[in-house]
Image (spheres, grey):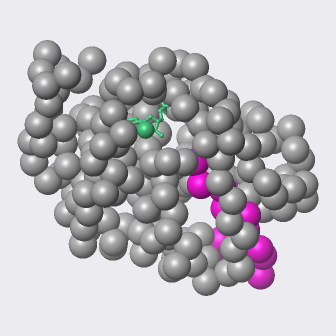
């Protein structure tokens, strides 16, 4: 698919401010507790790395790998668990960390799955949110930034596996539209 990077949408210093604010809120909300933070691979890896270094309470890290996009820009609606987490979350305070909530199908599926493991609490933190595209009534507890219905890349987010390493969030233009 022909595509090009249209413009920088969220510059790195703005992202940093947002991540700092999120970390402050989380540190306050979980004062005196330990958190298990589960990064959803691959998109969350940069956000998670930035976030955990700003959090002031003990954190146990783990990862899950799921796939719902299969190379395009539109969700297939199918969520496949490629790698499950290793840590036992029973009676633990768990936060799922996602790059972006789009349809919400990935998070809904993950939340349902992790709830069957009886955590003490389960919340969701996402760097970005596209509320206009929601297909479920999932609400993320911690959101960095709400964005309009644009396809973004960089800061961990990819198009067809590429551009995750861009330090700023950029808008991708795709020939024939983003659908
Ligand atoms: P959902 O299940 O539709 O909420 O999709 C969530 C996943 O879709 C995210 O974790 C991303 O991997 C991917 N995604 C959704 N919107 C974008 C975008 O604008 N850029 C890059 N990836 C996206
Ligand atoms: Mg992705």
Name the residue rendered at 38%, 27% in the picture: 71
> Quick check: which quadrant has ligand 1?
top left
Vertical arrangement, residue 135 with respect to residue 131, above or below: above
Residue 80 on image: x %, y %: 63, 27
Vertical arrangement, residue 22 with respect to residue 170, above or below: below
Quadrant of the rendering where the N terminus is positioned: top left
Residue 155 is one of the magenta-drawn residues: no
Residue 41 on image: x %, y %: 54, 48
Q: Is residue 115 left or right of residue 171?
A: right
Vertical arrangement, residue 154 with respect to residue 131, above or below: below
Residue 31 seen: no
Which span of residues is magenta-colored? 28-40
Residue 7 on image: x %, y %: 10, 48
Residue 32 is one of the magenta-drawn residues: yes
Name the residue rendered at 84%, 61% in the picture: 92
Q: Residue 106's quadrant in the figure?
A: top right
Q: Pick the residue in front: 93 or 75.
A: 75
Name the residue rendered at 25%, 67% in the picture: 12
Query: Number of numbered discs present?
Result: 0
Q: Residue 19's quadrant in the figure?
A: bottom left
Residue 158 on image: x %, y %: 34, 42
Residue 179 seen: yes
Q: Pick the residue in front: 92 or 160.
A: 160
Quadrant of the rendering where the C terminus is positioned: top left
Q: Is residue 72 left or right of residue 98?
A: left
Vertical arrangement, residue 82 with respect to residue 165, above or below: above
Q: Residue 11's quadrant in the figure?
A: bottom left
Q: Is residue 146 left or right of residue 82?
A: left
Q: Pick the residue in front: 89 or 18.
A: 89
């Amino acid at each position: 698919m022909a595509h090009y990077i249209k413009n920088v949408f969220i510059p790195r210093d703005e992202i940093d401010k947002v991540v700092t604010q999120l970390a402050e809120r989380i540190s306050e909300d979980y004062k005196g507790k330990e958190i298990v933070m589960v990064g959803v691979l691959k998109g969350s890896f940069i956000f998670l790395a930035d976030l955990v270094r700003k959090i002031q309470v003990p954190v146990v890290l783990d990862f899950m790998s799921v796939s719902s996009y299969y190379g395009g820009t539109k969700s297939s609606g199918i969520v496949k668990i490629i790698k499950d987490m290793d840590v036992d979350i029973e009676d633990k305070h768990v936060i799922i960390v996602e790059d972006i909530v789009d349809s919400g199908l990935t998070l809904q599926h993950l939340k349902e799955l992790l709830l069957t493991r009886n955590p003490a609490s389960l919340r969701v933190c996402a760097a970005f949110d596209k509320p206009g595209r929601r297909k479920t009534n999932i609400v993320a507890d911690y959101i960095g930034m709400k964005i309009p219905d644009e396809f973004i890349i960089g800061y961990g987010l990819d198009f067809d596996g590429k551009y995750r390493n861009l330090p700023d969030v950029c808008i991708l233009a795709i020939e024939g539209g983003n659908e």
